[in-house]
Amino acid sequence: ELPVILPQASEAQALTTQPHEMIVSIDEKGQYFLEGQSISLHTLDLKLRTAATNNPGRVPVVLRADKRCPWEFVVAAVNSCRKNKIHDYRVTTREVPHNSG
């Protein structure tokens, strides 16, 4: 690496860290979980807002919902992502095994 003396900037901002993938699980009753902790939709919204503020445009979110979960809870989590300008979100499913016959 070439040794250089960097100029100073009065309006410089600190570098943000690489965000880790946020995995939101939703159980069959519509309860949200983040990092193993049960949270409310309001708390999920606050966590997503904080993540998006700290790393604008760079927060991947994975939504994992139990297949018996009412769809309205998944939609609420998607809406929270969109409201907080998180565009890198996806709902995961389990792959169905293929018959080899």
Image (cartoon, grey):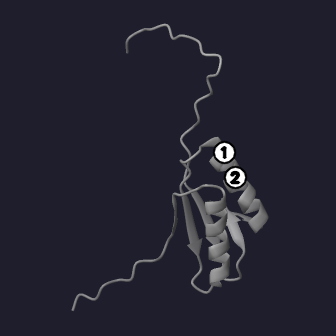
Can you see residue 44? yes
Q: Which residue is painted at 59% across and 35% down in the image?
A: 16
Which residue is nearer to you in this view: 64 or 11?
A: 11
- Measuring from the top left, give residue 64's x and y in whole percent: 57, 71
Look at the picture and state if 85 lies above or below 30: above
Q: Is residue 13 above or below residue 6?
A: below
Q: Secondary structure at mark 2?
A: helix
Which residue shows up at 56% across the image and 51% down it?
59
Q: Which residue is mark 2?
A: 49
Image coords of residue 18 (percent x, y): 53, 41
Q: Residues within 10 Å of mark 2 (few under 14, many from 20)?
A: some
Q: Quadrant of the C terminus?
A: bottom left
The quarter of the picture where the N terminus appears is top left
Q: Look at the picture and state if 69 lies above or below 45.
A: below
Count of numbered marks: 2
Q: Secondary structure at mark 1?
A: helix
- The residue pinned by badge 1 equals 53
**Left or right for 37, reference 16:** right
Foreground residue among 35 and 74: 74
Q: 84 or 14, which lies in front? A: 84
**Is residue 61 found left or right of 93 in the rendered image?**
right
13 relative to 94, above or below:
above
Q: Amino acid at mark 2?
A: Arg
> CA separation, marks 1 and 2?
6 Å
Is residue 39 at all visible to an observer of this figure? no
Picture quarter containing residue 47?
A: bottom right
Residue drawn at point x = 55 percent, y = 48 percent = 57
The answer to whether the residues at label 1 and label 2 have Cβ atoms under 8 Å apart is yes
Query: In the figure, is residue 44 to the left or right of 90?
Result: right
